Image (cartoon, rainbow, N blue to C red):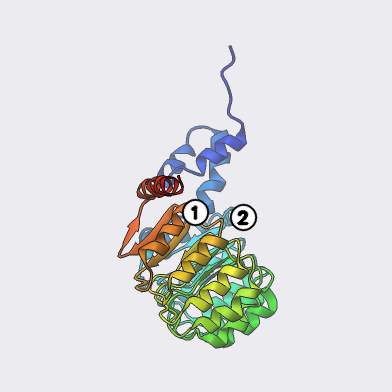
Amino acid sequence: MVPPVLVDDVIILILDHVDQKTLYSCLFVNSKLYQLTLPTLWRSPRFMKFRNVLIFQQCLQPRPHMEKYIKELCFNRLGFCNYLDDELLIQITKSCKYITKLDLSFAGMITDAALTIISKHCSQLNNICLRECRTLTNDSIKAIAKGCLTLISLNFERCLSITSLAFDELTANHKNYVKKLDLTLCKWVNDDMAPIISKFYSLRKLNLTNCTEITSDFLTTLAPNVPNLEAIYLGGVLRITDEGVIQVVDHCPNLRILVLCGCDIHDRTLYHIAKKLKNLYKLDVSFCMNITHNAMRTLLCMNITKLSYGESDIDERTLMSLRREYLLSFNVANY
């Protein structure tokens, strides 16, 4: 009997879930597995320490043909690294022209000069994370907007030196493409930004956590223009009230994640959520002091699997138990 043989596509799927050390070992099994493993091994190198970055750079120099396999460069696991500077980053990215994702989280030494050069020779970038890159200014964002063809995901968390002026170029060139936008802790985001962000009408995920300068007027302007929104994070935005959230609920029926931690909302918002958002599976209303237990009970008839209320999270098992008790009491009352 001939032993079963795994087709190449199945092997590649398995390799996608294998750690980097094991992938390296697979190179030495046989020639076929070598050919199948090579693209996966090089596609998204993991940099746990700065030493790994230097080794990666040294490996690239004698192997320029490998650049076609590299699709992601993520330096976020290095933490606040002062060794990753403009010169090194430019050298690496020049040999990685086909990358689609670049994560520079906590890279405090990177400046506008590096991003300007990278945007010219990495035109296929569509996912850029600049979290905690506090030295970058509007010039970086404008260069990325001009050089990259289709930007889909943008993370500007705590980019303190960027202003709303940077978005003029983004909305002009990428308003049809941007689906994820993270502006966490960006104090320069205020109600005047709503008409600008509204131009990203393909937006699916918007993170405004701790953007304390916005009010419900922001949501009133934004909501009618982003009907495909599936997740919005408003935790810590204390000036968000019922009026703004209800506008989002009315105009974004596909919402699956809604985070309202600390917002100034009341029971009528929860009643509206229970009535309108049939696809919602995660709701965070922790530290919303004006919500009562009666309003929370109306959510038990929904398909929510992740619920945060008061000062704690309610896990899925507890939710199921509460849901059974609610339905039982409801049936008894009606009987």
Residue 47 appearing in the image: no
Q: Residue at x 55, y 54 (%)?
A: 63
From the viewer's side, name the closer residue of 52 and 335.
Answer: 335
Question: At 42% across and 55% down in the image, what residue appears?
Answer: 306
Q: What is the x, y in percent for residue 2? A: 59, 15
Q: Label 1 crowding class (10 Å Cα cut-off): few <14, some 14-19, many 20+? A: some
**Vertically, is 258 above or below 300?**
below
Quadrant (top left/top right/bottom left/bottom right) for the C terminus: top left
Instruction: Residue 185 in the image: state x and y as whole percent.
Output: 42, 78
Left-right relation of 112 to 202: left
Q: Quadrant of the N terminus?
A: top right
Q: Secondary structure at mark 2?
A: helix
- The answer to whether 149 appears left or right of 99 in the picture is right
The circle drawn on residue 68 is: 2
User: Please, what is the three-letter code of the amino acid marked with disc 2?
Assistant: Lys
Question: In terms of sequence position, does the residue under pointer 1 or pointer 2 come before the other?
Answer: 2
Indicate the amino acid at tag 1: Met
Question: What residue is shown with label 1?
Answer: 302
Front residue of this view, candidates 293 and 228: 293
